[in-house]
Image (cartoon, rainbow, N blue to C red):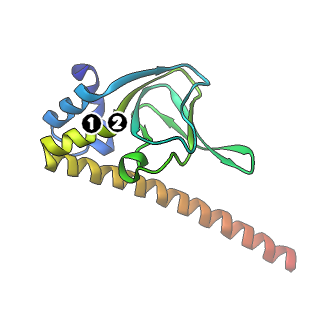
Amino acid sequence: MNEIYSDLLAEIAIFGGVNQEAINFILDEATLVNKNAEQYFFHENDIAEDMYILISGEVDVIKNRDGEQFSIAKLHRGECFGEMAILDHYPRSASVICSKKCVALKLDIDCFDKLYHRDMKQFTILQMNIGREVCRRLREVNELLFVDEFNSSLSQVIKVC
């Protein structure tokens, strides 16, 4: 599996700066997961113990609110999801469903624990990169919230005038 996916991982931001030995170790620990369209990787509020890297296909990230489901992101080849579980160990904050047939690498918490004991420096680089990815996504959401709030406030001002 290493030869097939090693180049892909090297192109993904969360593996930036991670050496080849650590990438090979991670690939040895990873599980390949196949899902058909309309199958879930996980549901919002599930226990979170792993993250995924999308090898092929496309997924929708779904958030429930007041009994309705909202698509908050669409992810493609080379993108990761479920990474918050590796950092905070809280239940899933959203659901992830395949919009097309998908293949993904599953990295569980044990893989990260083993990497920590094997090579703390590489573990730290990977954790920092995951943190950066979470922060990047948070900034995107903040920007969207600001734009939505600004447009909503502007709409209220226009109505008042």
Secondary-structure class at tag 1: helix
What residue is disc 1 on? 111
Q: Quadrant of the C terminus?
A: bottom right
| Residue drawn at the location 86% of the way across and 79% of the way down | 160
Q: How crowded is mark 2: few (under 14 residues within 10 Å), some or many (20 or more)?
A: many
**In the drawing, does residue 6 fall left or right of residue 85?**
left
Q: Disc 2 marks which amino acid?
A: Asp
- Whole-percent x and y of residue 83? 40, 45
Question: For the view shown, which residue lies furthest in the bottom direction?
Answer: 161
- Whole-percent x and y of residue 87? 36, 52
Q: Is residue 107 above or below residue 103?
A: below
Q: Disc 1 marks which amino acid?
A: Cys
Q: Quadrant of the N terminus?
A: top left
Give 113 or 9, whichever is nearer the viewer. 113
**In the drawing, does residue 77 fall left or right of residue 23?**
right
What residue is disc 2 on? 108
Give 59 or 11, whichever is nearer the viewer. 59
Q: Name which quarter of the figure residue 103 lies in.
A: top left
Check residue 75 in the rendering and tell me which mark sits there, or answer none: none
Q: In this view, does 117 lie above or below 148?
A: above
| Residue drawn at the location 22% of the way across and 20% of the way down | 3
Give 74 or 105, whichever is nearer the viewer. 105
- Whole-percent x and y of residue 156? 80, 73
Q: Are marks 2 and 1 in contact (CB under 8 Å)?
A: yes
Give 92 or 34, whichever is nearer the viewer. 92
